[in-house]
Image (cartoon, coloured by chain):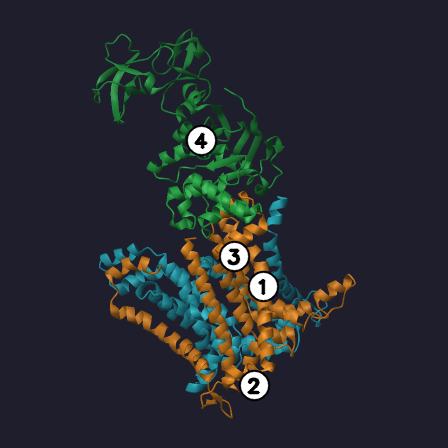
Chain colours: A orange, B cyan, C green
Amino acid sequence: MTSRTSAGVRRHGDGPLLRALASVPALTYLVILMAIPLALVIAYAFLTAGRFGGVQGPVTLDNITRMFQPLYLEILVSSVVNAGIATAFAFLIGFPAALVITRLSPTWQTAALVAVVLPFWTNFLIRTYAWIVLLNREGFLSDGLELVGLGPVEFLYTRQAIILGLTYAYIPLMVLPIYASLQRLDPQLLEAAQNLGAGPWRRFRTVLLPLTLPGIITGCLFVFIPSLGNFVIPELLGGGNSQMIGNLIRDQFLKSRDWPFGSALSLMVLALLVIIVMLQASASRRTRKWGA
Amino acid sequence: MMTRALRTTPLWILYAFLYIPIAVVVFMSFNASDSPYTWTGFSLQWYPALLQDADIMGGLRTTLIVAVGTTIISVILGTLLAFALERYFPSRFLDAAAAAPAVMPDIMLAVGLLAFYTLVGFTLGPVSVILAHSVFGIAFVAAVVRVRLSGLDPSLEEASRDLGASSLKTFWSVTLPGIRPAILAGALLAFTLSLDEFTVAYFTASPADPTLPIVIYSSVRFGVTPQVNALATLLLLVSFVAVLLAQRTARLSDSLRGRNT
Amino acid sequence: MDSGDVLLDISGVSRSFGDVRALDDVSIQIRENEFFALLGPSGCGKTTLLRVIAGFEQPDSGTVTLDGVDLLPIPPEKRAVNLMFQSYALFPHMTVERNVGYGLACERLPRDEISSRVDEVLTTVGLTDKRNALPKTLSGGQRQRVALARAIVKRPRLLLLDEPLSALDRKIRGEMQMELKRLQHEVGITFVVVTHDQDEAMSLADRVAVMDRGVVRQLDTPLDLYRRPRSIFVADFIGNSTILRGRFDQGTWIGDSAPGLSVPDTCRDAIALALRPEALTIVPTDDPRARVRGEIVEVFFQGDHALAQLRADGTVYLAVLRDDVLPRRGDPRGLAWDESAPIPLFEE
């Protein structure tokens, strides 16, 4: 895809010096400040914590096995469940919305997409903070329920509040890739299915879903992974006692100074990321094979 | 008309979900009461109050330094990266590497950078945050500029070379003006990104010199205050304006669509 | 003409998109087992009409009944009408077998019945060996057969075909044309073809409705459309013809060109005359049969025959050449025709 336009320009040839000058600094930067830090995290996961922070020998698998102790395993599982439910909600709200966007006129599509992405580019803390205002016992939602005689209710500091906050924070990232894959879908395929007698649910299950699966998985990846690593939302909306992997990692690095264990937990997140990326890649390969 | 409105319902649900919380914060920032939950009347008092808050002003100063520094590094290196990816060394591997900062969970990068800075003995402060934020910034600028670069008619550059211009002169007089809107949009995005970024800053900033999001975080942990509502409103405004400007200059949505496929 | 049972009754159907009237009071009756064609240039409303019948568009006014039952309140997935899309719209992720069986699976038929009916229809279209192929691996002609099989396996009361041959190479098109005709007889389903290609409509259909800007201009058998077009539009759109505008005055035709032609009384109310090329004979200028005289403008050799353009009194006539010796550009010639040859046209 990238070589298509480049051929013509490269023929005239910017000199090799210029090409190196353009390419080396940025790539060096990303190697030093992204690749090396990542490699450090991976390496630290197999080392032992120093007495006053830092790491030391010997090489060990203790950090990995420690994650499966009941105390931590419980947090890992509930993190995955929370992030999973948030991802599911983001999909349930995001998919129909993306479908609506693809049916707008091109100008409106752009406007609608910008409106979806806009909140994502604003301060994430403030968006989380907004929910404190809404969910608090004295907040709007509770007041509203009180008016109809159902309140006051404390929504804040519950697991539901965490899931809500995660869904809210990352839902724009669900809509974009789904929109992109829906847009590539021939709308006549849906009409064909309908013409052949398929109702809405069957059309979704047999045509829409399989043909947009790569975009859906990408969207789930974009919601699930950052949800897993988030420590602000569990803290602000879940209260002190609901922890997720992100909180554990933060605490290992900034409080208990057990970097190797924190690294091992990060590695776990990375492993989940890699698994989903591989799923996505295999789904895209299949879709390409269909020529869809 | 009725069925048409019905058909767009899912989109309106999404927008309500996205914007109602934001609207509530903005609304409450004009509240006269200092209780964050009860509306007693209209007032602008919390806005000037921000100027009196030393923590917030200090955080703002640090954040602006970080955001400007991040923007400069991101624009220069991100644009160069866009050329490398699009023109000089197109490869799937480099594509993936350049997209990695956008996909990688921010907490991984945060702890990795903390470990790295500690290992090499780099003092935490505004510079360490700038270097960290630029990792994201470069990726975003590269993505935006790249889309524009691929849409650039190569025959213009060939014509310039044909007329005897050196490659450097061609770059300055033909290529750069062609991609200027994308660079501008990328700069706005890198700036907003840095302005609002919390997680990586939290791990790589010096405790003595926190950025504004870190200041907000510490204050929000202890409850809702009317000042924070006012500050939030201003920050939302800055981000909205920056992103809408970026969209106008470079049809940002195209590159966003491109990035995520 | 036999008037079999009416299967589909379209009556007074109108549909506007903004200021554009895509369908303007359209009324058509389609009979059981008929091969019907909706013919017209792009934008004439034929596709909108097709979508109304299939249920993807709702008309602003008018009624559509199938077997006497009001079709409009029935959702597309419940109509006994199937559609073969112009792009075929085959499901790219399903094999030929699953594509064809899709509509039957929607009816929740037992698996072995689906399988036997898919077998049967794949045999009919000659694709049994491609059962497990993905659409991407098929040729254009094979894809079309799959699309056709997918639509007819449902045994609909009515099969709609949207530009069925337009995506095919010229060579395969002829084959498929005959194939469609054969299939229609074999499966005994009423076919409605939408096309902009007059050859396609004329060779396939029992009756053709010619549409223009949302209006049915003429509905007739192909032969009558050709021999007795009522309007300048239809005479021009179907086949080649030379149009002579003017008016009838006591047995002669008064017009800009060819003044004083004697014409029969049937042309009394005509606003123009059409002359088909095969009704014209090119003769030497001194031939007493010549009604007009002029010179040859261009000669088109077509293999089995040749056509010549002849300019006389500012009008360019198109005529079939029957001589073995072709005239050359600039040769003076005359044109002769029978008195009954001019076709009177009564509308624009």
Residue B146 versus residue A110 in the image, above or below? below
User: Which residue position is annotated with label 1?
Assistant: A88
Q: Position of residue A202 (x, y in %)?
A: 56, 51
Marks 1/2 same chain: yes
Q: Chain of mark 4?
A: C
Residue drawn at the location 39% of the way across and 78% of the way down: A32
- Crowding at label 2, few (<14), some or many (≥20) Cα neighbours within 10 Å? few
Inspect the image, locate mark 4, and give the three-letter code of the amino acid beneath it: Gly
B57 lies left or right of B91: right
Q: Amino acid at mark 2?
A: Lys
Q: Quadrant of residue C10?
A: top right
Where does label 3 land, which residue? A113
Q: Is residue C139 above or below residue C5?
A: below
Separation of residues labelled 2 and 4 (CA atoms): 78 Å
Residues beneath discs 3 and 1 located on the same chain? yes
Disc 2 with disc 4 on a shared chain: no
Q: Secondary structure at mark 3?
A: helix
Task: Left or right? Give the position of C40 relative to C12.
Answer: left
Whether label 1 touches label 4, CB < 8 Å? no
List the residue tagged with mark 2: A255
Question: What chain letter is assigned to the residue under label 1?
Answer: A
Q: Which residue is mark 4?
A: C40
Residue C163 in the image: x percent, y percent?
43, 37
